[in-house]
Amino acid sequence: MIDEAVALLACPHCGAGLDADPPTLLCESGHTFDVARGGHVSLLSGGGGKFTGDSTDMVAARDRFLGSGRYDSIMDAVADVADGHRILDVGVGTGHYLARVLDAVGESAVGVGVDVSKAAARRAARAHPRAASVVADVWTALPVRTGVIDTALSIFSPRNVPELARVLAPGGRLVVVTPTERHLGELVTALDLIRVDENKTRRLGDSLAGTFDRIDRRAVGYTMSLTPEDVGAVVGMGPSARHVTPAELAARVTALPTPIEVTVAVTVSVYRPAAE
């Protein structure tokens, strides 16, 4: 982990800043954290998180699908609205979005990717040389110093609103990507997948009201042509993967036309702290 990324981190036990002393990170109070051989570090505040996050299979499916370029337009839209050189991705997954943003905002940019999934953290540690990969529970205090982040990303991820507000620097921004009810609609119908709540946009606004003000909103929509392997990957990387067995999914996919045209429909929203 490069020192500039470590400088953004905080001890999950006492909140003090962390310093690198390879192969560990340590704080002034003496708490130490081993950096895994894969390059990630666990900064869970207790023995383990409440949630386990994405499985190894889900992370592998996400890596295959995002690596295919099918969501590049979403990544470009996120990179276009990011600002500053200190980037935090909460729910970083494979690190594809964080890497795209770091490349877009400049060579001085550094990033931190946080995910409760150890499998995701292992993959995110390889996503970009200027990013630190951290295992942490996003529903507790983020292991990030107060007021040090220029852009925080929440890409199809849960949002701990008070913590996101705390870590943002003055003038910082929060970038949120959410699916609309049309997103992957053809697969949702044909494969009986989990549907996007039609009130998701309203609920997002309600959850941020009083803490953040929206300053930009962009729709990203297009159609992609998917093979059965692509369908397996995009379903396998999402929440529906937890509710259907691989055998059931394979049987349903076999019945689909090949290739199948599938709709991408998401919203990229940009917020700033309401006090500004």
Image: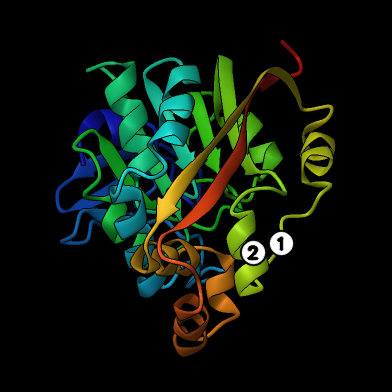
- Report the residue at 78% width, 54% height from top: 197
What numbered label is drawn on residue 41?
Answer: none
User: Which numbered disc, 2 or 1, marks the residue closer to the eye?
Assistant: 2
- Report the residue at 48% width, 33% height from top: 145
- Report the residue at 60% width, 35% height from top: 176
* Residue in front for this viewpoint, 50 or 181: 181
Q: Is residue 151 above or below residue 234?
A: above
Which residue position holds label 2? 188
Residue 237 in percent (x, y) is at: 45, 64
* Residue in front for this viewpoint, 176 or 194: 194
The reply to whether callout 2 and callout 1 are in contact (CB within 8 Å) is: yes
User: What amino acid does circle 2 point to?
Assistant: Val
Residue 31 appears left or right of 125: right
Residue 162 appears left or right of 28: right
Q: Is residue 27 visible?
A: no
Q: Is residue 103 above or below residue 261?
A: above
| Colouring scheme applied when the structure was drawn | rainbow
Residue 191 in percent (x, y) is at: 60, 73
Asked which secondary structure carries label 1, the reply is: loop
Which residue position holds label 1? 195
Between the C-alphas of marks 2 and 1, the distance is 6 Å
Q: Quadrant of the N terminus?
A: top left
